[in-house]
Amino acid sequence: MNECSISPVYYSRVYHLKAYVQLMLGNDELSQSYLEKGFYSSDIYGNHLEKSWLEISKEWWFTGKKTMEDFWLKAVPDFPIWNVNMTAQEMGAFHKNMYLLKVPELDINNPFPESSIEE
């Protein structure tokens, strides 16, 4: 995780990918452990998008339910329209949600703090 120390908001994504690798190697328990670490880190750093994908992966991988093959076909029509150089007025309410991730403040005296999340 040292590679992510500057942007710990990515921890949950890295744990998600590690969970996938372990699932492909047949290590279900280790995969679930990494998913739980992903949930924990997404809660700490406010990565709501990754948390939603962690929830989907957990359901698909470990409940035996069929994947939602048309998931994107159902989700895409609800995505906001995005054009280059849109004004805040053109974006409407979406403008308020542009930067939802909480980025930790940089400590000048300690720019590379140790992670509080175990690998």
Image (cartoon, rainbow, N blue to C red):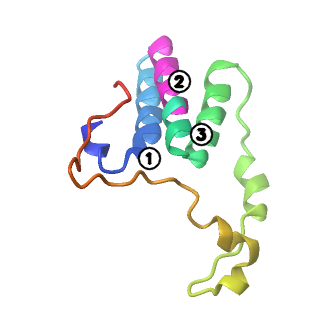
Tell me which secondary structure the magenta stretch mostly adopts: helix
26, 88: nearer the viewer: 88
| Residue bearing mark 3 | 51
Label 1 crowd (10 A; few <14 / some 14-19 / many >=20): many
Residue 83 numbered mark, or none: none
Q: Is residue 98 above or below residue 109?
A: below
| Residue bearing mark 2 | 36
Circle 2 SS class: helix
Residue 33 in magenta?
yes
Quadrant in which the N terminus is drawn: top left
Amino acid type indicated by mark 1: Val
Circle 1 SS class: helix
| Residue bearing mark 1 | 9
List x then y, in percent, for residue 97. Answer: 65, 65
Q: Is residue 61 above or below residue 53?
A: above
- Of the numbered discs 1 and 3, the one sitting upstream in the chain is 1
83, 97: nearer the viewer: 97
